[in-house]
Amino acid sequence: MEQKTLCKEGIVQKIKDDYVDVLITVSSACSACHAKSFCIPSEKRDVVLPTKNREKAVFSEGEKVSVEMEQKLGGKALRIGYFYPFVILMILLIGIYKLTDKEVLAAFLAFVGVALYYFFLYLSNRKKKMERQFQFYVKKLDASQFLE
C-alpha cells in the first residue's frame, strides 16, 4: 500500500549534496477566495524549503519540481503546532478561572502555559529531532504534469 503524500510545485534554487533548496509559493486560503478584495488582502509569500533528494535525481537550478511530504506528518504537525496548544490554553483558562474566580489571572497564566509549551518544543528540537521527522522530498515532474 502506497503512502499518501502532500505535493506542492516549486522551482529549484540551489543544489548541495543530497539536498535541494526549492522555492515554493505559500498562500493563505484567502488568496483563492473570490471575495478577497472585500475583506483582508490575500497573503502570498515565497519560502525556500531544504528538501532531500532521496531518488538521487539530477536537478538543475530553475527547474520545476514537486515537493512532497507524507500526509500523516501534516496532521501531526497541525496537532503539535495548533491543537495541543489550544487544549493547554483552554484547560488552564477554565481550570484556573474555576479555582481562583479571577479572569485576568486565568488568561495570563493560560498564555504563560502556552508560551512554556512552545519553549519546551523549541528546546526539544535543539537536537534537530523534528527536522529529521518532518522531512520534505523533491521529485522530478513528469512532462504530463506541465499544464502551462
Image (cartoon, rainbow, N blue to C red):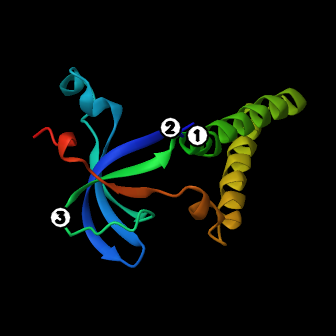
Q: Which residue is mark 1?
A: 72
Q: Nearer the viewer, residue 12 or 108?
A: 12
Q: Is residue 66 above or below residue 119?
A: above
Outermost residue toward the right? 99
For residue 33, what is the image quadrant?
top left
For residue 60, what is the image quadrant?
bottom left
Question: On the rendered image, what quadrant is the N terminus found in?
Answer: top right
Badge nearest the viewer, 2 or 1: 2
Mark 2 and mark 1 lie on one chain; the one further toward the N terminus is 2
Outermost residue toward the left? 148
Of helix, strand and loop, which one carries label 1?
helix
Q: Nearer the viewer, residue 113 or 145?
A: 145
On residue 39, which mark appears? Answer: none
The x, y position of residue 106, in whole percent, is 76, 37
Locate residue 127 relative to residue 56 in the image: left or right. right
Q: Is residue 124 above or below residue 97?
A: below
Real-space Cα distance between discs 1 and 3? 30 Å
Q: Is residue 78 above or below residue 101?
A: below
The amino acid sitting under disc 2 is: Lys
Q: Which residue is mark 3?
A: 62
Q: Residue at x 44, y 41 (%)?
A: 6
Of helix, strand and loop, which one carries label 3?
loop
Say whether residue 77 is visible. Answer: yes
The amino acid sitting under disc 1 is: Lys
Question: On the rendered image, what quadrant is the C terminus found in?
Answer: top left
Does the residue at mark 2 contact the one at mark 1 (Cβ under 8 Å)?
A: yes
Q: Which residue is mark 2?
A: 4
The x, y position of residue 146, in whole percent, is 16, 43
The amino acid sitting under disc 3 is: Gly
